[in-house]
Structures are given as C-alpha cells and as structure tokens.
Amino acid sequence: MAASNGAGVVVVFDFDKTIIDCDSDNWVVDALGATRRFDELLLNLPWNSAIDAMMGELHSQGKSIDEIAGSMRTAPLSPHVVAAIETAHALGCELRILSDANAFFIDAVLAHHGLAGYFSEISTNPAHVDAAGRLRISPYHDFRHGACATHGCTLPTCPPNMCKGKVMERMLDELSMEAGKRRRRRVVYLGDGRGDYCPTLKLAERDYMMPRKGYPVWDLIAGDRRAVRADVRGWADFQDLETVLLDIIHECASAAAATMKEDGGDQVVVPAECRSSLPLASAPELAMAVLPKAVQAPN
C-alpha cells in the first residue's frame, strides 16, 4: 500500500511565539488591563503560579471566563501558520503541541481558528474552570509539593513547572516502541524560547529542529552547535516557517521514497490537492539560514 507523503513525520509545535505571535499569558493580562499587577506577582512567584494567581484576582474583579477566552481569540495568528498546519496534516504528518502555556488558552485559539482537530496530542499546563467560574491553571510537573514532585531536570533553561525535555523523551520512547524493528518516525520540533532548548537536545541526527531566528533558543543552539544532534533549520517569520516546514516534509518524503524503491516497496504518493504546496527546490537551493550540523568528534 502506498504511503502518504508525510506519514513518517511527527511535527511538534511550541505555542507561544510559534503558533501565535505573542505570549498568551501576557496577551490576556494586557487585554484585561492587569499588566502592572501581574508584574508585581512575578516579583514573588514563579511564572506559572503568578498566572494562576492573576486569574484568581481577575475573577474577584468580575472578569468572566468568556472575557478571558475572548481575549485569546484576538491573539495574532498568521495565515502562513494556518496553511502550514493544514498542509502538513493533509500530507499525512502527525501534529502535536508541546507548550508552557496552558490548556484553556491553547484550546480557545485552536477552536476559534478551526484547528483543534489537526492535533493528536497537546502537552501543556493543565487548566480548568472551577465551580465558582474561576480559571485555575496548574503546573505540568507539580513542583508545589516537595522535591519528589519536581521534574528533576537540572538544565537552567527549564522552569520548575515544566521540563519539555522530559516530555520529548517520553514522545521519542513511544515512537520507538511504535516503530519496533523499523526506524521510528522523524520528529520536527518548532520553538522559540529558553524552554525549547532541553527538548532540542533530546532529538536525534535524523530529526529536525526549527528555532525562531533571533529568539532565545536560536541563540542557545548557536552558542554550542555541537550539543545539538538534530538538523537545525531556522525561520525568521511565519512565511519562512511555512516554507521551511514543508521543505523538510518534502525531504523526508523523498528519502522515504528512495528507501522504499531500494527495498522494492511502493512509491510515496503525494495527494493531488497538496502537490502545489510543496517546495520544488532542494534545501541547499532555498534562500534560508541553516545552522551547520555539528562536526563529529573522531573516535
């Protein structure tokens, strides 16, 4: 049976400043006129705890859940990101989100733009509306109840409430178990912030990292390129994001097709409706910044 073009690729998106072009916590706080108070809370609380406390104060001021969700619906989301998500999904890629935002904010944006059904998994800080109508935001790794509850990662770029590297390790383990004796599917990870550095370090040579150029994770990768085994492809704006992501999918499909041909298997079939979305040029021909792969140390 013929394989779809992106069936061998799992695309994992960060959310803030990657899917949407803002930080979702700051966006809501600013929209509801609570910026100064949030800054005060951050003087004494970790970020995740501060945003939960801020939601409590907004509730006490009479701000409704509908107002909070409404503010998230206005968060900037580029049509290039929408196109990238829709096309990657149509090509057979599995799409996931790995984010230090929270489930309520992410769900509000995805539902508003009709994108919720494209993602098979969303790993983020839990959120729920309690009986009083107050939004509660919890840490992904509950560090509030002693050292035994922390994620245990010592990398200084990981906040106490979430180590994305631990989540990425779990994803990669699951993909390896799924693959069995076959090679596991390739992972493409997109992100911008310091918290995106730890999962970057978990990726293998056959995976791809797409850091947003000029943002913290780009600088961290550039500062020690040898530490990252994945193929690094930077993106400067959201048109870049779409182009680079689809080019990677195209490369993976071409490699899979070559392998299948050598093995006497079926050729990779690209759905007709998606062919026009695939870049025709190979990676070296594209005018984009690509960090060189790490030089392997001699044995």
Image (spheres, rainbow, N blue to C red):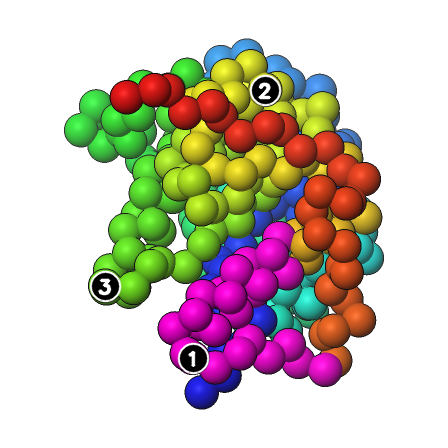
Dot 2: what SS? Answer: helix
Q: Magenta segment range?
A: 248-272
For the residues bearing labels 1 and 2, Cβ distance under 8 angstroms: no
Quarter-wise, where is residue 1 in the image?
Answer: bottom left
Camera-nearest residue between 248 and 33? 248
Spatial CA span between label 1 and label 2? 39 Å
Mark on residue 181?
3
Q: Nearer the viewer, residue 22 or 179?
A: 179
Q: Find out whether the residues at labels 3 and 2 contact each other: C-beta distance under 8 Å.
A: no
Q: Is residue 273 above or below residue 81?
A: below
Would residue 45 appear left or right of 62 to someone viewing this image?
left
Residue type, mark 3 in image: Lys
Residue 222 pos. (x, y %): 59, 20
- Residue 222 is tagged as 2
Nearer the viewer's eye, disc 1 or disc 3?
A: 1
Q: Tell me what residue is drawn at x 64 percent, y 61 percent.
A: 250
Q: Where on the picture, by quarter, is residue 177?
A: bottom left
Does residue 100 sit above or below 112 in this rendering? above
* Quarter residue 284 falls in: top right
Q: Residues within 10 Å of mark 3 (few under 14, many from 20)?
A: few
Report whether residue 40 is seen: yes
Front one among 158 and 55? 158
Magenta-drawn stretch contains 264: yes
Residue lying furthest bottom: 1
Q: Amino acid at mark 1?
A: Gly
